[in-house]
Image (tube, grey):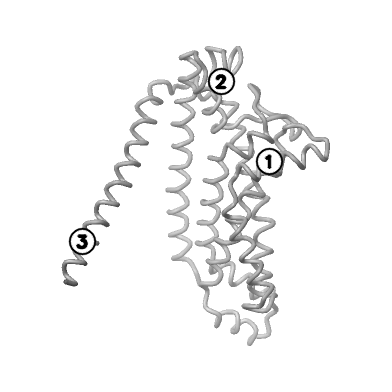
Amino acid sequence: MRKIEENIFKVLMVISTLIITSTLFLILYTIFSKGLGSLNWDMVSKIPEGGFYIGKGGGILNAIIGSIYITLGSTLLGLLISIPIVIYINVYATKNSLFTNITRLTFDILFGIPSIVYGAFGFTIMVYMGMKTSLLAGIVTVTLLIIPILVRAIDEAVRVVPEEMGHAVYALGGTRWEAAKIILRQSTAGIVTAILLSFGRAIGDAACVLFTAGFTDSIPTSLNQPAATLPLSIFFQLSSPIPEVQNRAYAATVVLTLIVLVISVAAKVVSKKLSKNKI
């Protein structure tokens, strides 16, 4: 009977794996079969000509640059906020206290909130402060979206580090800050993984920037100007009745997929190297 149950679950696992894998390859096939034919140097080196929705010429450079600006800005700002939170709840605060447990629970809840809610919240703040759609508003809203991801992922990486390492620092007369630096160094691989997760979520999200960053044919030159992103480029241009505009949307899907793929591979390589260099 146990052998039968084991075989049944083994078959179910294989079927599930095949379904997920085939779905992934089907998505990739759809993206690349429709997008590679439209992808050329002009597509990635020029901004839309005649309007992003009706203009037949130009490319998606404005969306590529806008996505990079918002993603890098929100990731860096998110790290500056997340790492001190993780250090405090793991080094300075009492371990497993009510405060630390509530803090972790709070970020777990924030992690599960849909991105459209963050977009609406960011839009509300913008209206209250009299701001317009801009690169700055997009960065701030996306930062709020990825902070729970960064905090929980880095927190889990830090908690894996043996407690004896911190105790050894204290035994040698070290301070809590010195212990925190050692713990963070041992968690470097996990921090890189957290950055990867947050970067992927930030660059692929459309709901947050829909209300806050806006959309434009131009490349922003200041934080107060609106910024286009690849997800919104796909969203707007794919609904256009003009084939040339739809081709830009398919090219944007290929570029977005390639960016995420390159970052994923690079982060994995860096994480593996950092894991070998830990002391």
Q: Which residue is mark 3?
A: 8
| Left or right of 250 on screen, residue 121 | right
Q: CA distance from mark 2 to mark 1?
A: 31 Å
Q: Which residue sits at x=42%, y=48%?
A: 265
At mark 3, the secondary structure is: helix
Q: Which residue sits at x=65%, y=23%?
A: 218
Find residue 46 and name its label: 2
Q: Which residue is mark 1?
A: 120
Question: Does residue 6 lie above or below 169 as drawn?
Answer: above
Q: Residues within 10 Å of mark 2 (few under 14, many from 20)?
A: some
Q: Residue 170, percent across and down?
A: 65, 84
Q: CA distance from mark 3 to mark 2?
A: 55 Å
Find residue 164 and name its label: none
At mark 2, the secondary structure is: loop
Q: CA distance from mark 1 to mark 3?
A: 46 Å
- Residue 58: which quarter of the image? top right
What's the amino acid at mark 1? Ala
Question: Does residue 157 lie above or below 64 as drawn?
Answer: below
- The mark lying in front, picked from 3 and 2, is 3
At mark 1, the secondary structure is: helix
Q: Residue 149, percent across and down?
A: 57, 55
Is label 1 in contact with label 3 (beta carbons under 8 Å)? no
Q: Which residue sits at x=45%, y=48%?
A: 264
Is label 2 in contact with label 1 (beta carbons under 8 Å)? no
Q: Residue 20, percent across and down?
A: 33, 47
> Looking at the image, which is closer to me, 28 or 10?
10
Q: Residues within 10 Å of mark 3 (few under 14, many from 20)?
A: few
What's the amino acid at mark 2? Lys
What's the amino acid at mark 3? Ile
Q: Residue 9, percent across and down?
A: 24, 62
